[in-house]
Amino acid sequence: MQGRRAGVISRFLADAIDLIVVLAALVAIQFAVAAIRFLISPRAFTWPELSVLNHATFGWILLIAYLTIGWANTGRTLGKTLLGLRVVEADGTRLTFWRALVRALLYAALPIGLFWCAVSARNASLQDLLVRTTVLYDWEPRLPAEHDDP
């Protein structure tokens, strides 16, 4: 499987793990804010309350940051690492920061696009088609090649 395009099931499982990571980070951040508020003023402490819209907005931003950083650095997030997957550009090189950011924005805005893999001849999600990326099975500890920008 090394170097072959990943299918919808392994990609979905990796993305589910990534979503759990982001949700856990949101909970940890809320607990940290509560702890700081308690330490500053224990007698007047109240649990920080955020609206659903604020939680969703902050979670969306955190998801985009998490995906962008993982894909731009190693091509992997925690979910992709656990399942042995790597996101690369169509030519096999490492994603640039901007391409990783656009891909993350598209995934956060339209997560259902992942399921296009099930009908795509090259196992490409809608986001992969728009940004010209691919997800490969890659258990090697190396990084993909960098771009030779002039």
Image (spheres, grey):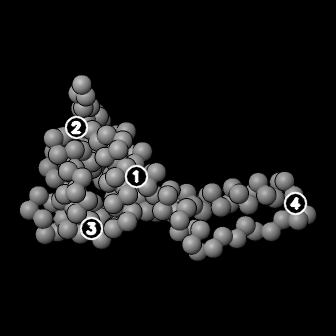
Q: Are marks 3 and 4 in contact (CB under 8 Å)?
A: no
Which of label 4 and label 2 is nearer to you?
A: 2
Mark 3 lies on residue? 113
Precedes in sequence: disc 3 or disc 4? 4
Precedes in sequence: disc 4 or disc 2? 4
Q: What kind of residue is marked 4? A: Pro
Precedes in sequence: disc 3 or disc 2? 2
Mark 4 nearby-residue class (10 Å; few <14, some 14–19, many ≥20): few
Instruction: Give residue 66's position: percent from left, percent from top.
Output: 45, 51
Q: Residue at 88% of width from left, 65% of height from top?
A: 44
Q: Is residue 2 above or below residue 35?
A: above
Q: Are marks 1 and 2 in contact (CB under 8 Å)?
A: no
Mark 3 nearby-residue class (10 Å; few <14, some 14–19, many ≥20): some
Instruction: State the CA–CA distance, disc 3 to disc 4.
Output: 46 Å
Q: Which mark is residue 42?
A: 4
The single residue placed furthest to the top in the displayed view is 150
Instruction: State the CA–CA distance, disc 4 to disc 2.
Output: 52 Å
The single residue placed furthest to the right in the displayed view is 43
Mark 2 nearby-residue class (10 Å; few <14, some 14–19, many ≥20): some
Give the structural element (helix, strand or loop) at label 2.
loop
Q: What kind of residue is marked 1? A: Leu
**Figure quadrant of the C terminus:** top left
The residue lying toward the viewer, choosing from 53 and 136, is 53
Q: Which mark is residue 67?
A: 1
Give the structural element (helix, strand or loop) at label 1.
helix
Instruction: Give residue 82's position: percent from left, percent from top.
Output: 35, 51
Q: Residue at 48% of width from left, 62% of height from top?
A: 60
Q: Which mark is residue 93?
A: 2
Precedes in sequence: disc 1 or disc 2? 1
